Image: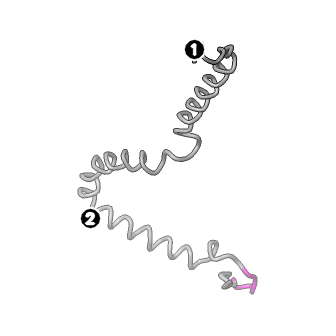
Amino acid sequence: MPDHSVHDRKGERTSFWRSRAFLVFLGFAGRALVLLWEEHRAHILGALPYLFLLACPLMHLFGGHRHGSHGHHRDESNARKRAVRSYKEQQPSAPPGSGHR
């Protein structure tokens, strides 16, 4: 794995995230974001309602398969099957040929 540490003036190793190079990068990235926002604000804000509408079906498709959602349907079905099975087990069995099932 490459070493991404930077040496400071005293020769000590410091992380890139605390180096002067990272601060320069943050300055350029911040300025770029401001310029992009100024030039494309109308397009971004104009598309925002459509992005919210698009987010709804995407969240339904991709976000509903965790945290136990939709699992209650299976639990209810299994509980219903167990209840029917236990009810049938409690019923007295009719003698063969009596016509009762």
Element under label 1?
loop
Span of residues in magenta:
8-13
x and y percentages locating residue 39 in the rendered image? 26, 64
Residue closer to the observer: 49 or 26: 49
In this rendering, position of residue 24 left or right of residue 2: left
Q: Residue flagged by tag 2: what amino acid is it?
A: Glu
- Tag shown at residue 56: none
Dot 1: within a 10 Å radius of its alpha carbon, few (fewer than 14), some, or many (20 or more) residues? few
Quadrant that contains the C terminus: top right
Question: For the residues carrying marks 2 and 1, which lies nearer the camera in this image?
Answer: 1
How many discs mark residues in the rendered view? 2
Element under label 2?
helix
Dot 2: within a 10 Å radius of its alpha carbon, few (fewer than 14), some, or many (20 or more) residues? few
Q: Residue flagged by tag 1: what amino acid is it?
A: His
Q: Residue at x 44, y 67 (%)?
A: 30
In this rendering, position of residue 53 left or right of residue 89: left
Residue closer to the observer: 95 or 92: 95
Label 2 – label 1 distance at C-alpha: 81 Å
x and y percentages locating residue 37 in the rendered image? 32, 61
Q: Residue at x 29, y 62 (%)?
A: 38
**Residue 30 sits above or below residue 52 on the image:** below
Q: Which residue is mark 2?
A: 39
The image quadrant that residue 15 belongs to is bottom right
Q: Residue at x 56, y 38 (%)?
A: 71
Q: Which residue is mark 1?
A: 100
**Residue 55 sits above or below residue 93 on the image:** below
x and y percentages locating residue 17 in the rendered image? 62, 72
Q: Residue at x 64, y 72 (%)?
A: 18
**Residue 88 sits above or below residue 24 on the image:** above
In this rendering, position of residue 33 left or right of residue 81: left
x and y percentages locating residue 75 in the rendered image? 59, 33
